[in-house]
Amino acid sequence: MKKNPQHRIEELREIIREHDYKYYVLAQPSLTDYEFDQLLAELTELENQYPEFITPDSPTQRVGSDLTKEFKSVPHKIPMLSLSNTYSEGELADFDRRIREGLPSSEIVEYICELKIDGLSVSLRYINGKLSVAATRGDGSTGEEVTNNVKTIRSIPLSLNKTSSTVFKDDEFEVRGEIFLELEAFRKLNEERELNGEKTFANPRNSAAGTLKLQDPKIVAGRSLQIFLYYLYSETAQINSQSENLEILNDLGFRINKNFRICNNIGEVLKYCEEWEAKRNTLPYEIDGVVVKVNSLRQQKILGSIAKSPRWAVAYKFKAKQAETRLKKITWQVGRTGTLTPVAELEPVFLAGSTISRATLHNIDEIVRKDIREDDWVLIEKGGDVIPKVVSVNLPKRSKNSSKVKIPSVCPVCGSKLFKPANEVAIYCENSLCPEQVKGRISHFAARGAMDIDGLGDALINLFVDLGYLKDYSDIFHLKEKRDELIKIDRLGEKSIDNLLSAIEASKQRPFNKVLFGLGIRFVGSGAAKKLADHFLNIDKLADASSEEIESIHEIGSSISQSVLRFFSSAKNRQLISRLKKSGLNFTEEEKSAVSDLLRGKSFVLTGTLSSMSRDEAKDIILMHGGAVVSSVSKKTNFVIAGENAGSKLTKAESLKIPVLTEEQFLKLVQLDKNV
Ligand code: IVH
C-alpha cells in the first residue's frame, strides 16, 4: 500500500534535517550528495502535488521565492551591544582590573575566550521551536529583517530537533551569532565577479554583508554563507555561564565554534590571544581578534553595561595583517579633480583573504618621507576595510643601483603640464579634458549618492568614453539617441542597454541637492550640496551668489565658496548645466508650499536657543509663511529672532538697529501662540 503522503513528507523532512545537521554542523555527512538530492527531489515533488502540506520550516523553503524590495525593520527585544577594543597586554590587564573592581573582592573570576569571527552579527528568534525572524544588528536597537536570506544557511535549523537531549524547553527564545563567508567561498565569489566585470569585494566580511542584503534568496543560497552561534537568551531557563550557554546551543543543534577556552586568570587569556594571533592563518575563515567574556552570567549581571558595550566583555584585536613583497613600479593615477595619486604596483601577494597587487602611496610627501623606490622590498598592511598601504621599506634588501622616484612633470594620461599649488602636497593635471578626469567626473555623477544611475559602472563609463559616446556627464542623457549603435556593442545587447536607458530616465527624478552633488564641484560634498540647495533653492540663484552670501550658510566656509564661484565662472560649466536642464534634471529644490504670504519678502536670522521649538522648526514656520531665513545679520535683514543665550548676532542686530523679536513675539506674529 502506498504511504500516506503527509507522513512521507514529514519523514523526508526529518531525514533531510538530520542530514543537514550532520553535514553542516558536525561536518560528518552520512549520505552521498546524490542520495541527498534524491530525497530532496522526492520531497519537492510531493509538496508540489500536495501544496497544502507545505510549511515554512520545510527544507524546501530555504530558498523562498519572494523577492523583498525593502527589508522590514525589527526592534531588538534586548539591544545588540558592541564591544570595546583592546590592543595590548596592558589594555587587557586594565580590563581585568576593572572587572575585579566591579565585583565584590571575594568573587573568583573565570574568563571564557572565544574567537572573534570577522563577519556580521544576527539575531534569530525562535517561536515554538521554529525559526520565526532573523534580523541584522542594525544600530543595535533596531535591525533589518533578513529571514529569507538567513534561511538559506543550511546549518541553521528551521525547526529544532525534537529528540534533543537538552533540558532547555522554552517556547520562545533568541540566539545570536556571526554570519560569515569562508575564505575559499570569498575567493571564488570574487573570481566570478571579476570574470563578469563586476566590482570585487574588499574582504570576506564585506562580501558576507553584501550577500545578506541581497534581494534574491536564490543568489544568497548559491554563496554558501556560514554561521557560528555564540549566545542564547532565554527568559526562563536557568543558565549559569557562557560556557553552559554554548553547550546548550550545541545540544539544540546550532553550530558553535569549538575553539573557545576557559581561563582562570588574565595571563591565561593573554596566552590564548597570542596563540590564536599566530595561528589565525590556519583557519578557513577570518578572525580579527578574541572576545574575552566573564564566564559567570551572575557576575555579568553585576557588572552590567555602559552606553553601548557591556563591562563584562572586551575584544582583543589582532594587529593588521602584513606581508612583504616587491614594489615593481610606481604609477600615477589621475582623479576626477585632476589630482595625481601615486600607486605601488606590487608583485602579487596573498594577504588577509585576497591577492594584492596594488597599494596606495597617498602622495609625494609620503614617498619622500619613507624614501620608497621602485624595485624595493616593501611591507604592506591591510587593516579591515582600508585599502592596502605600504608601511615601510626593507632597506637592507635594496639594490645598490636604485634611485629616488622621479616626480612626473607631465600628466601620464594626457601629457599636459602639471601644476603644484604652493600650499598643497598634491600635484594636478590641469587639463579638464584629460580622459581620466572625464571618466572620474562621470563616475562621480552616476554614483549612488549622486544621480544613482543603476548599471552605469566604471567599466561601462570607460568603454563609452573610449568609444566617444560620453565626453562629459551631460552626454549620458543623449545615449538614448544612440540606442541602435549601443546594442550592437559586444557584451552589451538589447536588454542591458534598455535597462540602462530606463535607469538614466529614472535618475531625472533625483532631487536638486543630489544633482548638485553630482556636478562634482570641488569641496562640495553631499552635506554641503544639501545646505546649498536648501538655502538657494535653485541653481541660478547659486550660480549668481556672492561669496558672502554662500559663506553666510552655517558651516560653509571660504574654500567651498571660492570653489563654487570658480565653477560657475566657467562658460563651459554654465553650458553643461543648461544642457542638463534641457534634459529635464531637477535644478530646483521643492519648496515647502507656503500656507500664507504673511512674511513674503522678509528675511529672518535665528540666534540663541528657542524654548518651544528647535531652530529648524522655527525655520520651517518662516518658510511656510513665505519668509526667508539667512544665517548672518546684515543691513538687509528684516528681523532677528533671539532665544536664550543669543550671542554676537544679537549684538550686531542691535548695532544695525534691526528689530529683534523674542520667541513669544515671533509666535504672536505668526499667530501660533496658544495664549493669544
Ligand atoms: S559577543 C555584547 N562573541 O564582534 C556581546 N561577538 O564588537 C557582543 N563577534 O557585534 C557580542 N565573534 O558581531 C561576541 N564570539 C563572539 C564574536 C562576536 C564575533 C562580533 C559581533 C559583535 C562584535 C563586537
Image: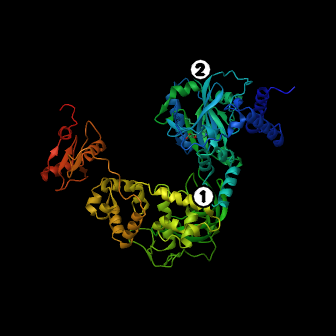
Q: Position of residue 515 (x, y in %)?
A: 42, 58
> Which of 33 and 85 lies nearest the eye of the viewer?
33
- In the image, is 142 to the left or to the right of 588? right
Tell whether label 2 touches label 1 (CB within 8 Å): no
Q: From the viewer's perspective, is the residue at label 1 or at label 2 nearer? A: 1
> Looking at the picture, which amino acid does disc 1 mark?
Lys
Where residue 617 appears, x then y in whole percent? Answer: 30, 42
What residue sits 41% from the left and 54% below the top?
A: 511
Circle 1 residue: 199
Residue 236: image tag? 2
* Residue 53 drawn above or below residue 506: above
For label 1, the crowd category at 10 Å Cα-Cα, with few meaning under 14, some 14 to 19 and many 20 or more, is few
Residue 22 in sight: no
Q: Position of residue 344 (x, y in %)?
A: 58, 67
Percent coordinates x, y for residue 642 in the rendering: 20, 43
In the structure shown, which secondary structural element does the residue marked by tag 1 occupy? loop
Distance from mark 2 CB to nearest ligand 1 atom below 8 Å:
no
Q: Quadrant of residue 242?
A: top right
Q: Amino acid at mark 2?
A: Thr
Note whether residue 245 is visible.
yes
Which is nearer the eye, 155 or 676?
676
The image quadrant in which ligand 1 is located: top right
Count of labels shown? 2
Indicate which disc, 1 or 2, sits on the residue closer to the N terminus: 1
